[in-house]
Amino acid sequence: MIKEVRVIYKLKKKRKEKGWTQLKLSEKSGVPQPTISQIEKGNRKYPTHENIRKLAKALEVDIRELEDESEDTATV
């Protein structure tokens, strides 16, 4: 569970760093905006690997980077 929270946090952080809305990320990734919202809010406890892969690709992030435990996840 902690691993999923870390990945979700990092995806949201990367999206915000790019200045993208959830809608823009949806357009770039092909993942529906309501799904992105649910993932970011933690309402989707276990997002599919396929959706995570699509989001990471759109954000130009390596999935291994998302799973790296060294980055602090204290703030969102």
Image (cartoon, rainbow, N blue to C red):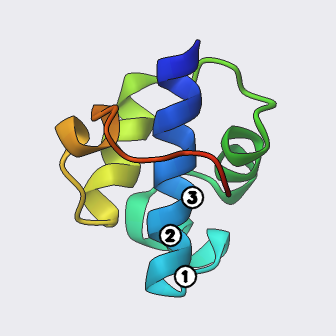
Seen as rendered, the residue at the extreme bottom is 19
Q: Nearer the viewer, residue 70 or 8?
A: 70
- Residue in the picture at 56% in, 75% down: 16
Marks 1/2 in contact by CB < 8 Å: the verdict is yes
Image quarter in which the N terminus is found: top right
Q: Which residue bears the numbered disc 2?
A: 15
- Residue in the picture at 67% in, 59% down: 33
How crowded is the residue under tag 1: few (<14 C-alpha within 10 Å), some, or many (20+)?
some
Q: Nearer the viewer, residue 56 or 28?
A: 56
Report helix, strand or loop for mark 3.
helix
Residue 47 appears left or right of 41: left
Residue 13 image offset from top left, x and y in percent:
52, 63
22 is higher (above) or lower (below) than 2: below
- Residue in the picture at 18% in, 49% down: 62
Q: Which quadrant of the figure has residue 69?
A: top left
Find residue 57 and name its label.
none
- Residue in the picture at 32% in, 64% down: 58
Residue 38 appears left or right of 67: right
Q: Which quadrant of the figure has residue 60?
A: bottom left
Report helix, strand or loop for mark 2.
helix
Residue 51 image offset from top left, x and y in percent:
44, 37
31 is higher (above) or lower (below) than 23: above
Q: Nearer the viewer, residue 56 or 74?
A: 74
Marks 3/2 in contact by CB < 8 Å: the verdict is yes
Q: Nearer the viewer, residue 4 or 44?
A: 4
Residue 21 image offset from top left, x and y in percent:
64, 78
Q: Which residue bears the numbered disc 1?
A: 20
> Which of disc 2 and disc 1 is earlier in sequence?
2
Find residue 12 and name its label.
3
Report helix, strand or loop for mark 1.
loop
Q: Which quadrant of the figure has residue 68?
A: top left
